[in-house]
């Protein structure tokens, strides 16, 4: 079982997203998974220009010469891909979106309909399962509504949405204790996904635990 995290935070390895990704990877490794962690911000990924060469002229291959050729191989060779992103303007970062646009060579030029929505069919290889790991700077859960909707067609097998994300790398010891309790659920989620492909109700509940009350958090992040 190979699990690859594609971290779309512009802060890369110093991001709050990374704290979640590392906890998840730790659990997956404990269950025997082979894992990889790609910081998209450090990759040369040009914008998709919509030329559709990857469908009609050079099927399956993008004609842009950059790091995406290698990343596509990593993507295709993964059993599970985990898209990590902070919420930026209610959605994923431009960094992750840019990468996802460039995955178009893995799709085929055949239109399919699902519950009234249209999409392109998958290409001729086994598509990896998808996991979403996100954190938002604000409290509350509606910060993730847009991202959830956007990622719905990918049918994620797990979505981890962490509000109050600015606490994930807090220096305060009291906060670190609560964060570490929360991260133990993220690690368990990684373990369970790598062993069973799904998480238990207890872990799902843990992933929704409160890190701080809303008034406390608003005070904490307000200057
Ligand atoms: C340009 C920008 C837009 C943001 N938009 C939102 C937003 O819409 N909702 C939200 O809850 N937080 C928003 N945030 C806060 C980030 O989600 C928060 O700082 C997060 O913890 C950063 O995660 P990272 O360290 O993984 O990059 C925004 C931050 C930036 C820089």
Image (cartoon, rainbow, N blue to C red):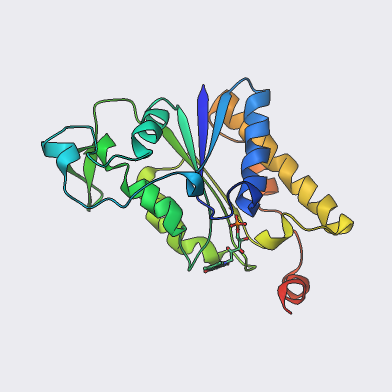
- For residue 163, say whether it is visible: yes
Say which residue appears at 41% left-offset and 25% top-offset: 77
Residue 2 in the image, given as x and y percentages of width and height: 51, 24
| Above or below, comparing residue 126 to residue 120 in the picture | above
Q: Return the residue nearer the eye: 184 or 10.
A: 10
Residue drawn at 50 percent across, 64 percent down? 88
Residue 20 horizontal/vertical position (percent): 64, 46
In terms of image quarters, where does ligand 1 lie?
Answer: bottom right
Asked which quadrant contains residue 128, the reply is top left
Q: Please, which residue is most extreme toward the left here?
A: 57
Side of 210 relative to 13 (left or right): right
Q: Quadrant of residue 191?
A: top right
Using the rendered image of the protein, determine whether residue 191 is visible from the camera's viewpoint: no
From the viewer's perspective, tell me whether residue 220 is left or right of residue 86: right
Vertical order, 195 against 129 (above or below): above
Residue 121 place in picture, x, y as percent: 22, 38
From the top left corner, tell me how far across and down residue 32 is, in percent: 62, 20
**Residue at the (34%, 40%) spot, across then down:** 66
Q: In the current view of this chain or complex, which residue is farthest to the right?
A: 173
Looking at the picture, tell me which residue is in the foreground, 213 or 27: 27
Q: Nearer the viewer, residue 85 or 214?
A: 85
Quadrant where the C terminus is found in the figure: bottom right
């Amino acid at each position: 079982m190979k699990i690859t995290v594609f971290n779309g935070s512009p802060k890369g390895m110093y991001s709050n997203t990374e704290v979640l990704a590392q906890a998840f990877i730790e659990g997956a490794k404990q269950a025997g998974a082979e894992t990889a962690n790609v910081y998209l911000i450090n990759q040369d990924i040009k914008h998709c220009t919509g030329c559709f060469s990857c469908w009609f002229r050079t099927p399956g291959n993008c004609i842009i010469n950059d790091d995406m050729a290698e990343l596509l191989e990593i993507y295709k060779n993964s059993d599970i891909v985990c898209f990590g992103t902070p919420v930026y303007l209610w959605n994923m970062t431009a960094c992750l979106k840019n990468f996802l646009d460039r995955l178009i060579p893995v799709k085929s030029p055949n239109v399919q309909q699902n519950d009234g929505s249209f999409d392109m069919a998958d290409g001729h290889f086994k598509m990896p399962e998808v996991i979403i790991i996100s954190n938002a700077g604000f409290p509350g859960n509606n910060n993730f509504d847009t991202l959830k909707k956007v990622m719905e067609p990918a049918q994620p097998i797990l979505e981890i949405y962490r509000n109050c994300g600015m606490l994930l790398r807090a220096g305060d010891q009291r906060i670190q204790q609560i964060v570490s309790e929360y991260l133990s659920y993220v690690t368990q989620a990684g373990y369970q996904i790598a062993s069973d492909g799904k998480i238990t109700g207890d872990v799902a509940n843990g992933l929704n635990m409160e890190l701080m009350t809303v008034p406390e958090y608003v005070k904490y992040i307000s200057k």
